[in-house]
Image: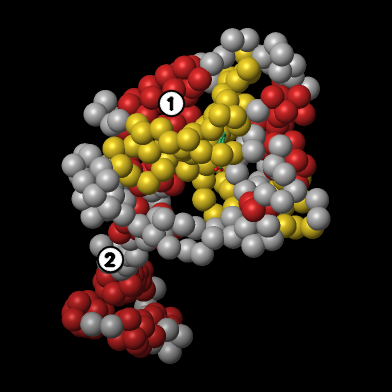
Amino acid sequence: MIENLEKLRKEVLEAVESAKSLDEIEKIRVANLGKKGTLTAIMKGMGKLSAEERPKVGAVANTVREDITNSIEQKFSKIKKALDDKKLKAEKIDISLEKHSIIYGHEHPLMKTMKELEDLFVSMGFSVITGPEIESVENNFDALNSPEDHPSRDMSDTFYIDKTTLLRTHTSPVQVRAMKKYGAPIKMVSPGRTFRFDDVDDTHSPMFHQIEGLVVDEGISMADMIGTVNIFIKSFLGEHIETRWRPHYFPFTEPSAEVDVTCHYCDGEGCKACSMTGWSMELLGCGMVHPKVLQNCGIDPEKYTGFAFGMGIDRIAMVKYGISDLRLLFDNDNRFLNQF
Ligand code: PHE
């Protein structure tokens, strides 16, 4: 019987060793250790043995059972682990796969220009004050001494919301707000969006940006205005840039002027872009604040004088960065924006 047991141990261990699947192992287990299994049957038959033989055979049978059980367990875990590894490998996520790359935003050249302008004016002692884009007709026109029949008040020039409200056509109403709120003396700039009924072309857009400047104090003269504007233009656009002053009319300043700067394409030589004049499109309007405007805003024109200027930030950005078409600023095309 012991011989049979040893034979069984050898056979089963070999069978387990060469088993390739969990199924095979399970079959071996059932065939040997199961209720109707070979080893179980041998053990059951031990009752027939003599009292002398029984413990000897029993001891061997126990080691056989242990060996078989152990080898089955080991082999089972080995195959299970191999299967798990295979599965893990198959399910591995390849993190090196290309993902959609993130397109980073970029500071807009207009906002950049606006910030640089603010910084420059702050360094010259100006405060920055902003006003609303939806304005009263009163602040946009009346308080600024604009006559009822002035062409800029026309429906075809201005976006009215109703009879008394509109999208501001310039940043000048912030002059009114600031003077009414803070009185004199005052030295401020006001950047922001403005709106006019313009068709879109390379130098026009119905929405554009301006920066307004206002200085009111005792004894302010035209020399202060010309000096301030010239210093600003040279610091911002370059020492070589000259200004040309042309008399102009604005209802809220008297006298008034428009200022051109050296053409940025030809440096004043004369080219196609400046129609051979050497001067680029007008950059700003300015003038001495009209006494009536001071009065409308509660400031004594006998005591105080002042100057004001307003310029297109879009145009300044075009001159500064050599942009030939205003529309590029509003197209939001990254190929363009990333250049700044
Ligand atoms: N508001 C004027 C415009 O939009 C510019 C300006 C501002 C002129 C201040 C004089 C003084 O054209």
| Residue 324 lies in quadrant | bottom left
Visible in this render: residue 46?
Answer: no
x, y (%) of residue 152? 63, 51
At horizontal 35% and vertical 57% (from top left) the residue drawn is 325
Q: Is residue 81 left or right of residue 232?
A: left
Ligand 1 in which quarter: top right
- Dot 1 crowding, Cα within 10 Å, few <14, some 14–19, many 20+: some
Q: Which residue is mark 1?
A: 229
- Residue sitting nearer the eye, 280 or 110: 280
In the image: residue 250, left or right of residue 182: left
In percent of width and height, residue 81 lies at: 30, 68
How much space separates mark 1 and mark 2, taking CA atoms?
A: 53 Å
Q: Could you say where residue 238 lies in the image, as x and y percent from the top left?
A: 28, 29
Q: Secondary structure at mark 2?
A: loop
Mark 2 close to ligand 1, CB under 8 Å = no
Three-letter code, disc 1: Val
Disc 2 target residue? 98
Question: For this rendering, which residue is in front, 99 or 283?
Answer: 283
Residue 336 falls left or right of residue 305: left
Please say if 194 is above or below 246.
below
**One can see residue 156 in this view:** yes
The amino acid beneath tag 2 is Glu
